[in-house]
Image: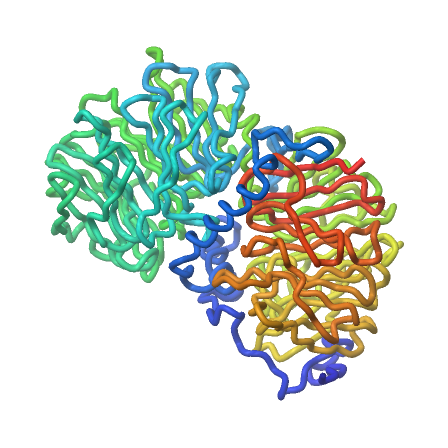
Amino acid sequence: MTWLHKATWLGGLFAAAGTMSLAQAQTATDDSGYRSTQTFRSFQAAGGGEEDRPTVMGRLEWLKARYGATLPADFSHRMVQEWAKQRATYPQLAPGATPPAGVPQWQSIGPTRAVKTQNDIQLSVTDSGRLRNILPHPTDPNTVYLLSSSGGIWKTSNFESPYPTWTPITDKVITTSGGAAALGRSPQTLYYGTGDPFDGIPIVGGAMLKTTDGGNTWSPFVFLGNSGMVLDVKVDTRGATDVVLVATDAGIFRSADGGNTYAQVLNGGRVWSLARSSTGWLATAATSGYYSPATLYWSNDGITWTPLSAPNLTGGAGRITLAVGAPGDNVVYAYAANSCSSGCDQKDLFRSGDGGYTWTALGLNSKAPVNPNEENPTMELMGGQGFYNHMIVVDPTDPTRNTVYLGGQLNTGKTTDGGQTWRLMTNWLAQFGLPYAHADHHTATVSTAGGMKRVMIGTDGGLFLSYDEGKTWTDQKNTGLVDYLIYSMATSGSDPKSVLIGLQDNGTRIRVGNTSVFNQSFGGDGFGVGWSQSRNVTALGSYVYGYIYYAQKDPNIQKKWTDPTFDDATCTYNGINACNAYFVTPIATPSAQADPGGKTYFTNTKSLIYRTDDAGASWTPIFSGSTAATYIRGASHSVSVSPIDLNHVAAVSPGGRVLITVDAGATWKQRNTLVPGHLGYNSSVAWANNSVLYVSSENPFGQSVYVVKSTDGGATWAAASNGLPNVPIQKLLAAPNDLSGNTVYAATWLGVYRTTNGGISWSQFGAGLPTVEVSDLYMPADGSFLRASTYGRGVWDLSLR
């Protein structure tokens, strides 16, 4: 094993760092072999604010670097096999089941609401997670279904109450990753398509499920060929049996028997949208995904599809969303974005008066609303993320079909004259005299149930409702929806009730005390978080590309965060090389024993590992490799420190390797963790003590060993995953109250698992956790409880005393 000596070639900036020799240099990419097309400099050049920059594309590119440009064709099938195996093995631990006596049960602690939101401007609003569809009952104003992107379907039977009671109805099924959903002829019938198009790697994508009793029970799932996501679902209820059309990333699938079976009727690439007009069915597709030109398809019967020539609509376009006021309308709208090879911005809104044969551009990009502002002087609403921010709904109560609502990045707009004039309705920060609605709009509907019109829009921040056709809006219907997309979690060592979470486009949020209220204390995307485990109150959070903000005082008090200082000459944030950083910035927090002062944290870029001893005010690399190569994988929990001291630090490396130092970074060893059945894609390291450590994998291609163990400080490794499902693992946590190293917890894509015998055997741990990706774990030093965060279903506690 080669020793890696102290770096000198990068000069004073990296003088304290260990580096590999050129002979040991890594490849330039992660295990997937994919290199992100987005760099920090291109991200920086795209704009000055979080919504000006290509944050969505950066997240997707980061996921591709971790897992590959495309998922393995059998990925969802393997995940389902493992899910079925675990359900058969642990039926009493499933959500809704009665667990055996003595088995601890997971309890949701939220977030259910917020009372303060901080994003440069302080607001008193409540958000929830990203929505995919809003499905109101056609006649009962109190019954509404919501499909969230990774929190599944939620139902309320008292929507008209100021704060509805929301119930998740898909926690028991194969995944909470929501692609699209639609009501059948009966409002008790829902068709649910799995696989969110913007999460990169859903647990199970491209499957359809059905309920006929409002979500109490669900049919067996049906796979749609090799599709990995569902983008739209439409139901034709004119005949005796529901006919279901499903738009996927592998074309269109059709069911003529009410969702029991499906047949592929179009192999047309990524189909974004479906609509039924007076001429038949219309569909829009981008043949090569997000980036390619678009195609408009037509079908008389939903079975045979033909491309329609509409060069003014499809030329240079990428994603196009279709909208009609009611199925069978002559008037059809098409909201189009430019291809991402041409800027990914808004192309235009188009209108057809003949069912989709011919189209007229409405000239949005040069048309000013009657109330312009500095963010939207014209009706160019999409910004640079046109493939992502795409909301349109046509008011079905307007017989002329001239009333249309649009949403993009920061603002929403409305026309009542078919697009001749427009008025802005909402703003992402409630600026310019406009009411608040969260940024990034995805879905909308107009309900007339009970004789009252309601306009509902769904965004990255959940549900927003207007009772007066867009003049005023309320966010309070989000209260009770626990569907945030959480990347990481930290808990105060001095007050374990206090929790920090980093979320997709919902900032860094904090819970203080026994409450389900999590207030936003820092805006934008929130990724890594850290909180001191000693009595000192210091905390960290991160944005993108090495941007770590820090609090030397209680972070619950808003405006107590300090932003890092950027040095353009060295491309660094307080010493962290942004030009070498991943889009997502991880943070590792030492134990109280290792760091009694409570001011030391660790992070990494592709080629460097950093340490701070002043709670983020400055960072010094303790490992440096060539910035042309990749030494540390871009996982969510890629760096770890021993619970004993600060000398033992490790980071996961490409090729089934791990970097280890036992002398605080003066020297490093590169260890090979590959054993039979373990093929790399290392995702996290768990130190039990200075000799015993575990490494997990997030390999999407499948393998038989997802955890390996060393008892000699990393010199040798052995398989230690018997009983674990063969699915990706986000994080391992060695129990802090068992320094023997025998008790370890695993955050997998199918729940939390535990070993108490050093990895000889594992079993599912705790009852009642939904089928959702577990993103992080925490346990206090006394081992009194286990806490888990999830990507779509909030934070959960499990009492161990």
- Residue occupying image coordinates x 37% and y 44%: 207
On screen, residue 436 above or below 657: above
Where does residue 466 sit, x and y in percent of width and height? 42, 22
Can see residue 109?
A: no
Name the residue nearer the viewer: 787 or 549. Answer: 787
Q: Which residue is pictured at 62% across the width and 88% down the height?
A: 23
On screen, residue 417 above or below 754: above
Does residue 73 appear to the left or right of 436 in the view shown? left
In this view, which residue lies farthest toward the bottom? 23
* Count of number-bearing discs: 0
Q: Which residue is drawn at 32% across and 36% down?
A: 392
Residue 724 placement, left or right of 64: right
Q: Where is residue 198 in the image (x, y as percent from the top left)?
A: 43, 49
Query: Residue lying farthest top?
Result: 451
Residue 270 at x, y percent in the picture: 30, 52
Residue nearer the viewer, 191 or 605? 191
In the rendered image, which quarter contains the N terminus? Answer: bottom right
Quadrant where the image shows the C terminus: top right
- Residue 663 visible? The answer is yes
> Coloring scheme of the render?
rainbow
Q: Quadrant of residue 12?
A: bottom right
Can you give x and y, in whole percent of width and height, for residue 143 in the image? 42, 19
Residue at the location (54% across, 33% down)?
A: 127
- In this rendering, position of residue 81 left or right of residue 594: left
- Determine the image quadrant of residue 444: top left
